[in-house]
Every structure is written in C-alpha cells, then in structure tokens.
Amino acid sequence: MCGIVGVISETPVNQLIYDALLLLQHRGQDAAGIVTMQGTKCFMHKARGMVRDVFRTRNMRGLPGTVGLGQVRYPTAGNAYSEEEAQPFYVNAPYGIVLVHNGNLTNASALKRELFDIDRRHINTESDTEVLINVLAHELERAASAGRLTPDEIFDAVRAVHKRIRGSYAVVALIAGYGLLAFRDPYGIRPLCYGVGRDGASGDVMVASESVALEGTGHRMVRDVAPGEAIFVDLDGKVHARQCAERPTLNPCMFEFVYLARPDSIMDGVSVYQARLNMGETLAQRLISTIPPNEIDVVIPIPESSRPSAMQLAQRIGKPYREGFVKNRYVGRTFIMPGQGVRKKSVRQKLNAIGVEFKGRNVLLVDDSIVRGNTSREIVQMAREAGARKVYMASAAPPVRYPNVYGIDMPTKEELIAHDRSVEEIREFIGADALIYQDVNAMKRVVGALNPKLNGFEASCFDGHYITGDVSAADFSAMAEQRTRAQADDEDGSARSRLALQSGEAA
C-alpha cells in the first residue's frame, strides 16, 4: 500500500503534489518523494519520513516545473529502511523516465534475472519498483520507432509490460519531453483514478490513488483507470487512453474497503464509507446470533477505520454508540509501522481510554480487522483497566488467515493470529469475553452490491485465493526471509544511505 500521484498543469506543480501527498498520507508514512520536470530536466527530493517532515521550503524551491509526480511509501518489497529504495525511481534511457508504483510484483526475482541476462539492465536494489521501471524502459525502447515517440508506441510498450510482469501495480511515470503515463494491472487490484481541473482549463490533469487527492486539490474526478488500461497525458494536457491487457477483470483489493482507503474516497464506483456501513450491517447479524444484544451496554469503535461499521452495528442492535478511546494523531498507524517491538510499544501511546464509558459496563469493541492480535489484546486489557465489566470484541473483517502478496505488508502466516487457530483460541489470546468475526461471503456480497460491474475481489488474506495464480510456497518463504533481513539491517543501520538527483539536495 502506497499513495501515488501525477500531475500535468500549466502552472508549477510542486505545491499541488505536496498537497495531494498530504491527502494520501494514510497510505504510507515510511518515506515520501517528489519529482518535477522542467523541459527534459528532472528535479527530485525523497527521504524517509512523513510528507511534512521530508519537504521543507528549500526542498520545494528546488522542484520547479509544470509536470511532476510523487509518492508516499509504506514498503512491501525490498528494504523498509533504505532511503535508496524510497520512490520515485529514475532511469536515464530511453528518454529519461521517472516512476512511482503502488503494489507488489510477484515475479520480481525472475524478472531481475531476466533483465540482467537478456535485457542487459542492472538492478541495484531489492525494490520491485526498480524492476518495474527497467521493464517499462526496455519495452519503450523496443516499441519506439526512429522518430518521435507516439502514444501508440507507448501503449504498445505497456501491452508488453503487462505480458511480462505479474502481481499488483498501479503506476504513474513521467517520460521526459513527452508527458505522463499511468496504467493499472489487469485485475485492478490496486486503485487508480484521474481527474481534471474544476475550472475546465485545459492542460490540468491529475492521476492519483484515491479520489480524495483529486477533490482536495480542486480537481473533478473523471473516472477510475480501468484494469489493464493505460492513460497517456501529453504535455498539452490531452488525455489518450487505451486498453492494453488481453483479458482484464475488475477485482479490487477488499482490504482497501476494510481498512486502507479513506472513508470519503470512491473506488471503482464504490463509496468506501458505504462499504463500511454495509459491513457493519452484516456484522450486526453475526453478532445477534452469538450474543443477545441485551447483554451489551455500549458499542465502542477502535479509531479510525471501524467507526462507520460500529455506528451501523450499534443502530442495528439498538445500543448506544460511544467514543471510548481518544487517539493521539501524532503517532503513526501501528499496522504500517515496521518492527513488532515498535508496534507493541506504540499502542498505549496511540490510544487512551475514557474511563466513564467503560466503568461497570459490558462493552462491545468494534475494530476493522484483527491481524496479529497483539494490539487487540492490549486494547481489551485497556478496557478492563478502565473498569469494563465484560469486554466483547467484533471484527468488521473476517479472520486474516493468509499472507498478502499484492502490496499490503501482511505478516508471514506464523505471525497471523488467525492462521491455524480457531475463533475460540483467538478469543483466549486477546482476552475478550466473546469474539465475533465478519463472514467473508457476506462481506463480498454487500460490498459488491454497491457496483454490479465488479467481477469480484482480491481477498486472499481472508480466503487464501491468489488471483494472479502464480504464488507458491517458495514465495512465502522468500517474503519471510526478506522481512527478517530488512529488520536486521535496521538494527545496525547498515541500510541507511542518501541519494540525490540533479536538484543538488540530498534526499
């Protein structure tokens, strides 16, 4: 999960990209980067940290130009602690290409060998984004004729990219001297949409992960980029679009609707907020069959993503909805913080219980999901310490039983509390008096009903079905080894380095 944005405008875009990244900050807090182009020259600044910390006035002044892109990163491949693996990535041939990517390539290792042995391209990091940009660069070089690069040739290159890479990917790239290219994987796993300036002025086009980035920067959303589709925006702001995949299907990631996306976003024709309300409705039905509502005094959400589901559930069972936890907004989201030690330490720094809402009551806590279980156990204990008589826990998502390989930093299966454990065993681990999970088929049904054009969902962390059909046990072993190696690198600081590109500023 990362947040990406690309812009072509008639005015400088550095502030516009910065504002869009702030609106996408929830999608990644590990690193941030911006590249702008003036003529054919690139200017880059990227570093570890949140947007507000990475970009200072001096950095913004070093990003001129009316074309640019940016990314907020939360790493799912490569090294989480290396600034060299922060995006954007750059290659100087052909033309000069800069690229940002949201997703995860499942065949990155094979492609890396292929690029070196056949394409004669060297990959210097463990990042699958560096693999992706080199595949795109190679295919652009093959597709280009002797003359000026045309939109048709660009689309031919994307068509070849689709045939070579596997996994999930939403991509925005700048081609020096030509314009902005955006494309999405043939399954539509990771989100991507585009819009234009509200004043109707030509030459103002933005592509972004979520619609909130468009709306919050004064753009009008046109539509989602279709699965397998490529959009090329030339330097005059003219949009060219073409389907580049042979058999595209629309199967967005279910976890976007459960947790990752902002509730005010619209993704693939589905309101994220309404999807979470619907999940609360079906969760209430599951609850009623497990716990008599008269045994519950109050429904309390775990901030933030669970609020719509908790509100709908409370209304459905006729119990009061209360805010029982105060969130410290200046502590990062525990789910995307690297390292279990950091995650565990942050729970009580992040949340504080309001004792009056718990004392002497039977409380139902509603969370968006339960991944490792450690945070849930800590929260249940906080509720008891605040005076709750009984603590019930409900998850708006089904049990997370399987790792995710499509761009979400799910732990290895051994770290997942629901892997090979019964609901009763999970309940004992977190210390709740009762535990209620969402039903996976009901969740798919009520979210899918919001847009009949959806072909299904990528829900592998819940149902174990990997939609690209190329995921093996060896892939999971490689993921586990990579996580262990990356965490070891962070402990000794060996992976930390800096990288600059043309702007003269160290990233």
Image: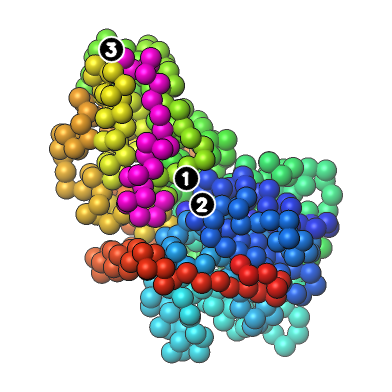
The image quadrant of residue 284 is top left
Indicate which disc, 3 or 1, sits on the residue closer to the N terminus: 1
The answer to whether any part of residue 280 appears in the image is no
Q: Residue furthest front?
A: 492
The image quadrant of residue 387 is top left
Which colour scheme appears in the figure?
rainbow
Residue 487 vertical placement versus 296 (above, below):
below
Left/right placement of residue 134 relative to residue 199 reads: left
**Residue 347 is a magenta residue:** yes
As measured in the structure, the alpha-carbon distance from the residue carrying label 3 to the one carrying label 1 is 31 Å
Count numbered badges in the picture. Answer: 3
Quadrant position of the C terminus in the picture: bottom right
Q: Amino acid at mark 2?
A: Gln
Left/right placement of residue 490 relative to residue 47 reads: left
Indicate which disc, 1 or 2, sits on the residue closer to the N terminus: 2
Task: Write the start and end of the magenta stretch as one range.
Answer: 337-360
Name the residue nearer the viewer: 338 or 392: 338
Q: Amino acid at mark 3?
A: Gly
Residue 113 percent coordinates (x, y)? 40, 83
Q: Which mark is residue 332?
A: 1
As measured in the structure, the alpha-carbon distance from the residue carrying label 1 to the one carrying label 2 is 7 Å
Q: Which mark is residue 360?
A: 3
Residue 120 percent coordinates (x, y)? 50, 89
The answer to whether any part of residue 333 appears in the image is yes
- Mark 3 packing: few (<14 Cα in 10 Å), some, or many (20+)? some
Q: Amino acid at mark 1?
A: Gly
Q: Which mark is residue 29?
A: 2
Residues marked 1 and 2 touching at CB (< 8 Å): yes
